[in-house]
Image: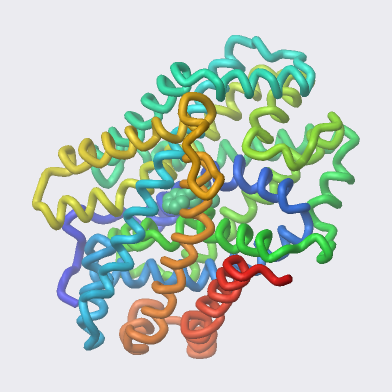
Amino acid sequence: MKNKTSIQGSWASRWIFILAATGSAVGLGNIWKFPYITGENGGGAFVLVYLACILMVGIPIMMAEVFIGRRARKNPINALADVAEESGSTKKWGIIGLMGMLSGVLIFSFYSVVGGWVLHYIKVMLTGEMIGVTSDAAGSAFGALLADPATLLGWHTLFSIMSIAVVAAGINKGIETATRIMMPALFVLLIILLGYAMTTGGFAQGWNFMFEFDFSKLTWNAALVALGHSFFTLSLGMGTIMAYGSYMTKDASIGKTVLAIGGLDTLVALVAGLAIFPIIFSNGMDPAAGPGLMFISLPVAFGQMAFGQLFGVLFFILIAVAAWTSAISLLEPTVAFLIERLKIKRMTAAIGLGITVWALGIACLGSFSFMSDVTFFGKNTFDFFDYITANIMLPLGGIFIALFAGWVVKDKFAQDELQLPSAVFKLWNISMKFTAPIAVAIVLYFLINPMK
Ligand code: PHE
Ligand code: NA
């Protein structure tokens, strides 16, 4: 293919790509969502299915996304179209990218609301108003926040502006340095929190909850959530990694890079779970408490530990940064597309998309108050956007990307980018052609037709 670089620019090095992609992957999905869905789905068996999905479906699909983006060096829609054309197929494959962009818009609109919760908790930790609270009080404080749309709107707006500003600034100098410092810091603080969790007396129970595989608790719905989350947490199925891949230099090994990103993301999720569940059990809280799990358990923990206020402030700042680097990546594919398609300035594209997602976000934050009556299939807007994106749209996007990479793209083009040892290439190819699409199809089928 003729494009040596994307018109958007490229990453300075392989490390910058790893940092940016890890910044996208590691986010609220790891620290907020993973623990609470593990709690809701009974623990161990869910974690095992999740790990299997990461390894057998997520990592291979991530390799496909990176190579498609890097080969075409364009936004996801055009990248899919160009790579299809090169292999003698139709440019219509670009449609997968369109569905991905819609997923990005819907995800951003609830993600930004949760990002806003995190910003609010930085303030709460700073003022020290939750020092020494009981879990009941922490639960009512979280409930009161949800019921207060004006406060939520302020934080959601701030989080949206932060994200739009970085995307508008382009292939991001600022965020690169931020990621370089903040990601290791986040990890260190997670380890400190884990250390604290080990002293609470709930550690064994937390560990067992996560790693005792009781398959009688596994339902098709739990398997769907595990599969969907493996896409969500690795930022797959919607073009983010494809867009980031289009800015990647040619000399970097895709296989090793993707393993590093997937490994880091998984590590952060598991450590987050091991830090949070012991706190839950030692305070007699409910692991199935849902989206409030982190916001209720952490203030209680920080309220009890030495230097808890300091660690609490730092921790929520780092979660905010992790959420921020992911939020940017939700917007980037669509912004790149708008620039390349409409020939408009990055600033214009970012602001236009920004206003759209910000407005949709208002419907999400209102789900807990003035819009609580508006439901889709029995779910409020916030839950509905979360459900259809993570559990349906991302897995479907992933199936199509896999089928595309496995059946449409000529092996020699794929291997030209991936440069895998031939046995590994065969495995990857089987995963694209069969394992990944079949796994997703089975789970979606049983979701729609529950077994009696
Ligand atoms: N991977 C991010 C997280 O775990 C969320 C995300 C999904 C970001 C899809 C980009 C694309 O929080
Ligand atoms: Na993640």
Q: How many labels does the image show?
A: 0
Is residue 115 shown to the viewer in this render?
Answer: no
Q: Which residue lies furthest to the left in this view?
A: 343
Instruction: Please provide percent x and percent y for residue 204.
Output: 89, 45
For the point 41% across and 66% down, which residue is it? 397
Instruction: Please provide percent x and percent y for residue 1.
Output: 19, 77
For the point 46% across and 30% down, which residue is it? 371
- Colour mode of the rendering: rainbow
* Residue 452 appears left or right of 312: right
Tell which of 185 and 59 is nearer to you: 59
* Residue 213 appears left or right of 140: right
Is residue 136 shown to the viewer in this render?
Answer: yes
Tell which of 392 and 411 is nearer to you: 392
Instruction: Please provide percent x and percent y for residue 90.
Output: 22, 81
For the point 46% across and 46% down, which residue is it? 385
For the point 25% across and 86% down, which residue is it? 87
Instruction: Determine the image quadrant of residue 305.
Output: top right
Instruction: Please provide percent x and percent y for residue 253.
Output: 42, 70
Q: Is residue 265 above or below residue 429?
A: above
* Residue 439 appears left or right of 236: right
Name the image quarter holding the C terminus.
bottom right
Q: In this view, does 410 lie above or below 79?
A: below
Instruction: Determine the image quadrant of residue 299.
Output: top right
